[in-house]
Image (cartoon, rainbow, N blue to C red):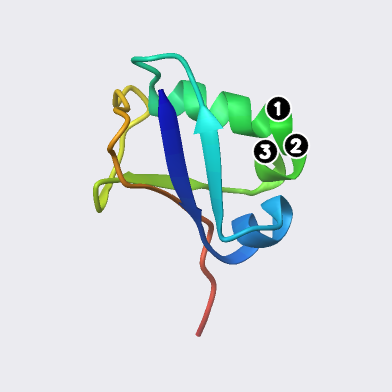
């Protein structure tokens, strides 16, 4: 299945693009997606936290992904 992932902040800088298109096996989970992204972009694995949103809601690691899902990587946020 094809997935389009929106990237924000440092994730955009690491990947070098505001979005990423991937072809992954059907039924892949958020955890499996992150494992693949960490392998392709090792710097993502060095972030102290990285949230994944699916269809505008924070997703759990076991959330199953579907081709038409809206997926976003949300990096750690700092501020004051």
Rendered location of residue 39, percent (x, y): 70, 27
Where is the N terminus found, in terms of image quarters? top left
Q: Are marks 2 and 1 in contact (CB under 8 Å)?
A: yes
Rounded to the nearest angstrom, the CA distance separating label 1 from label 3 is 8 Å
Instruction: Indicate which disc residue 76 carries.
Output: none
Count up the numbered dots: 3
Q: What residue appears at the point 34 percent right and 15 percent down from the top-left corner?
A: 27
Residue 38, quarter of picture: top right
Task: From the top left corner, tell me how far across and down residue 64 is, in percent.
Answer: 29, 23
Marking on residue 42: 2
Residue drawn at the location 53% of the way across and 59% of the way down: 76
The disc placed on residue 39 is 1
Marks 2/1: CA–CA distance: 6 Å
Q: Quadrant of the rendered structure where residue 29 is? A: top left
Q: In front here: 11 or 70? A: 70
**Separation of marks 3 and 2 at Cα, in angstroms:** 5 Å
Whether residues under marks 1 and 3 lie with C-beta atoms below 8 angstroms apart, the answer is no
Whether pointer 3 and pointer 2 mark residues with C-beta atoms closer than 8 Å, the reply is yes
Q: Quick one: SS at disc 1?
A: helix
Dot 2 falls on a residue whose secondary structure is helix
The residue that mark 3 highlights is 45
Is 18 placed above or below 51 here? below
Foreground of the two, 2 or 57: 2
The spot of residue 36 in percent (x, y) is 60, 25
């Amino acid at each position: 299945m094809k997935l389009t992932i929106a990237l924000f902040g440092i994730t955009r800088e690491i990947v070098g693009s505001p979005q990423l298109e991937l072809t992954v096996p059907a039924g892949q989970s958020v955890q499996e997606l992150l494992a693949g992204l960490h392998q392709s972009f090792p710097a993502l694995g060095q972030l102290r936290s990285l949230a994944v949103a699916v269809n505008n809601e924070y997703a759990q690691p076991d959330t199953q992904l579907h081709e038409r899902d809206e997926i976003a990587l949300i990096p750690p946020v700092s501020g004051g």
